[in-house]
Image (tube, grey):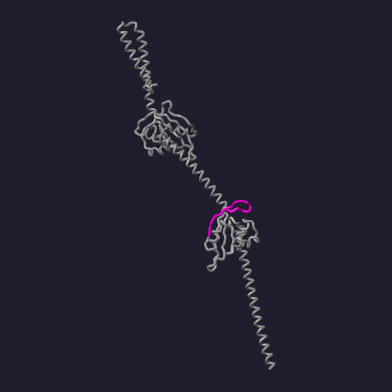
């Protein structure tokens, strides 16, 4: 009986030893698995840390108690804290009363499970003001908000660039308005000028004409634009003018043409008339153009011809008066009176004619 009990006890001992060895083996396996998982977690943590530290913005995580559980390098550098100081810090201590009050509505929204995005101007520890674009992304597990991820981008340079662009746009708008005003004044002068005004490019092609050109030459504006300026000259003068124009374009300077009365123009109907032209070169869109001011000299030439005719007749009258003085002594009294009366009337007529404004 005693031997049987001893044998049973030995069997139980061996069985317990075997079970203990199995448990130890299982524990070793579990320990190895835990070690492997811990190594993987460490590698994962280092990877996440490396990744987060190399992101261009700030990355942080705040739990539902508003304590910091993670902050990347840029986050800590922005606020001027070390990793040991940041981890476990409350968001109240980080932001301060004023910034916390400004961000409270977004914090509450994130803890309620709603993604938040806003811009904020933050003063750095250096004292500089920085523009930021912030996002609060809720961390939700099985319907429960555990905290929220903070993503903050420094958009200071972008804001400064935008402000410069806005400033430049404002200046451009002002310059454009001034230019439009100048263009409007030029248009009014150009369209209401008493002289015909047109511009030609370096090839002698007409670029722009005012209404007076159409009145003077009988062409519609669209008929002249793109044509060479010689279309407005008599055919026999075109080749000679082309040579003069080519030479002038090599060194364009302000000058006049036709003051001697030798320049003739040709209308669309073929009739010719005298003109005077003033030339003024200008730079436009990087190219040289010439503005021509054209005056119709027809009336003035007619007035000059009439004045010359009057002077000629006066000269003839003076000659007659000289002949009369020579022969006066040979006339009797009655003939002298008749001749004096006729000459007096003739002299008064010439004097009255010379007093007309167009002959002065």
> Which of the 4 image quarters holds residue 14?
bottom right
Q: Main secondary structure of the magenta part?
A: strand
Foreground: 239 or 152? Answer: 152
Residue furthest out toward the bottom: 1
Q: Is 251 displayed left or right of 351 in the figure? A: right
Q: Which residues are magenta?
A: 116-130
Does 298 appear in magenta? no
- Position of residue 252 measured from the top left corner of the image (x, y, whole percent): 48, 33
Foreground: 59 or 217? Answer: 59
Foreground: 156 or 109? Answer: 109
- Position of residue 143 measured from the top left corner of the image (x, y, whole percent): 53, 68
Above or below 130: residue 144 = below
Above or below 9: residue 321 = above
- Position of residue 321 measured from the top left corner of the image (x, y, whole percent): 36, 11
Q: Is 244 displayed left or right of 38 in the figure? A: left
- Position of residue 139 measured from the top left corner of the image (x, y, whole percent): 55, 64
Quadrant containing the C terminus in the rendered view: top left
| Count of picture labels | 0
Above or below 308: residue 89 = below
Could you tell me which residue is drawn at 64 percent across and 56 percent down?
Answer: 80
Foreground: 156 or 224? Answer: 156
């Amino acid at each position: 009986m005693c031997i049987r009990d001893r044998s049973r006890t030995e069997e139980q001992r061996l069985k317990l030893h075997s079970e203990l060895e199995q448990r130890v083996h299982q524990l070793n396996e579990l320990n190895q698995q835990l070690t492997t998982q811990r190594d993987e977690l460490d590698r994962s943590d280092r990877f996440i840390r490396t990744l987060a530290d190399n992101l261009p913005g700030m990355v942080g995580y705040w739990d539902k108690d508003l304590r910091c559980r993670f902050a990347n390098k840029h986050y800590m550098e922005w606020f001027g804290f070390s990793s040991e100081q940041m981890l476990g810090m409350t968001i109240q201590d980080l932001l301060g009363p004023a910034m916390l009050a400004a961000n409270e509505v977004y914090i509450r929204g994130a803890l309620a499970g709603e993604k938040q995005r806003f811009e904020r101007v933050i003063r750095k520890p250096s004292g500089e003001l920085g523009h930021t674009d912030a996002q609060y992304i809720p961390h939700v597990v099985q319907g429960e908000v555990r905290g929220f991820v903070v993503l903050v981008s420094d958009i200071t340079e972008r804001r400064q660039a935008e402000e410069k662009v806005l400033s430049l746009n404002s200046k451009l708008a002002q310059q454009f308005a001034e230019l439009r005003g100048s263009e409007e004044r030029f248009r009014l002068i150009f369209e209401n000028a008493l002289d015909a005004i047109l511009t030609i490019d370096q090839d002698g092609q007409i670029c722009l004409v005012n209404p007076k050109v159409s009145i003077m030459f009988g062409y519609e504006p669209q008929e002249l634009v793109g044509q060479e300026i010689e279309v407005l000259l008599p055919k026999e003068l075109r080749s000679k003018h082309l040579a003069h124009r080519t030479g002038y374009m090599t060194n364009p300077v302000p000058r006049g043409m036709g003051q001697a009365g030798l320049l003739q123009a040709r209308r669309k109907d073929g009739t010719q008339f005298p003109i005077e032209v003033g030339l003024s070169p200008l730079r436009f869109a990087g190219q040289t153009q010439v503005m021509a001011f054209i005056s119709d000299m027809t009336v003035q030439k007619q007035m000059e011809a009439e004045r010359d005719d009057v002077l000629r007749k006066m000269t003839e009258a003076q000659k007659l008066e000289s002949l009369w003085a020579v022969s006066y002594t040979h006339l009797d009294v009655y003939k002298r009176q008749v001749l004096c009366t006729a000459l007096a009337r003739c002299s008064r007529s010439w004097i009255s004619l010379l007093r007309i404004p167009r002959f002065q």
